[in-house]
Amino acid sequence: MPTASIDTDYMSHHVKPAEMDWTPTKFHGVDMKPLLIDKATGMVTALVRMAPGAILPDHEHVGIEQTWVIEGKLVDTEGPDTGLAVDAGEYVSRPAGSRHAAWTPDGGIMLAMFTLPNKFFEADGEVVDVLGNDWEVTWGKGA
């Protein structure tokens, strides 16, 4: 049988998270395992692990955010849903443009799906991306 040429753009992307190392983020106690990062669309799917008491500070989502809490609890500490607690086995979605801060009182693991570039608002007024880069310099005013 002749061998056909395979277009790898249409092949499945198989990931084995159990074999991946956790990657620290710029936020103390928050690590991630990126499962998918589509640079063309900014789509991200990642496992996020937060240590007990870890905080994901004030940030704004440029696209829809979806989070399924696998272990622990995720609690909004700022924003329109302050006090909202999402427990293990529960799901929450937030619209584009939503802004909040969240923490995990006892730690947790979440499956997070969102679109880059989220804006993180620092206490000194600086706006950065998830890597700590100046948001406007990296992403521009139109993003």
Image: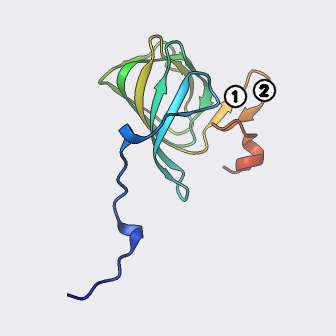
Give the answer, above or below, for where 112 lies relative to 115: above
The way the protein has been coloured in the rendering is rainbow
Is 107 in front, or is 78? 107
Is 137 in front, or is 14? 14
The disc label shown at residue 140, or none: none
| Residue at 63 percent of width and 36 percent of height | 130
> What percent of the width, then of the height, locates residue 49?
46, 27
Badge 2 density bin: few <14, some 14–19, many ≥20, Cα 10 Å: few
**Tag 2: residue type?**
Gly
Name the secondary structure under disc 1: strand
> What percent of the width, then of the height, locates residue 51?
50, 18
Q: Examine the image and state in which quarter residue 113 appears.
A: top left
Give the answer, above or below, for where 128 lies relative to 38: above
Q: CA distance from mark 1 to mark 2?
A: 6 Å
Badge 1 density bin: few <14, some 14–19, many ≥20, Cα 10 Å: some
Residue 95 visible to an observer of this rendering:
yes
Q: Quadrant of the N terminus?
A: bottom left
Circles 1 and 2 in contact, beta carbons < 8 Å: yes
Residue 141 visible to an observer of this rendering:
no
Q: Which residue is mark 2?
A: 125
Q: Which residue is mark 1?
A: 121
Name the secondary structure under disc 2: loop
> What percent of the width, then of the height, locates residue 133?
73, 40
| Residue at 65 percent of width and 30 percent of height | 26
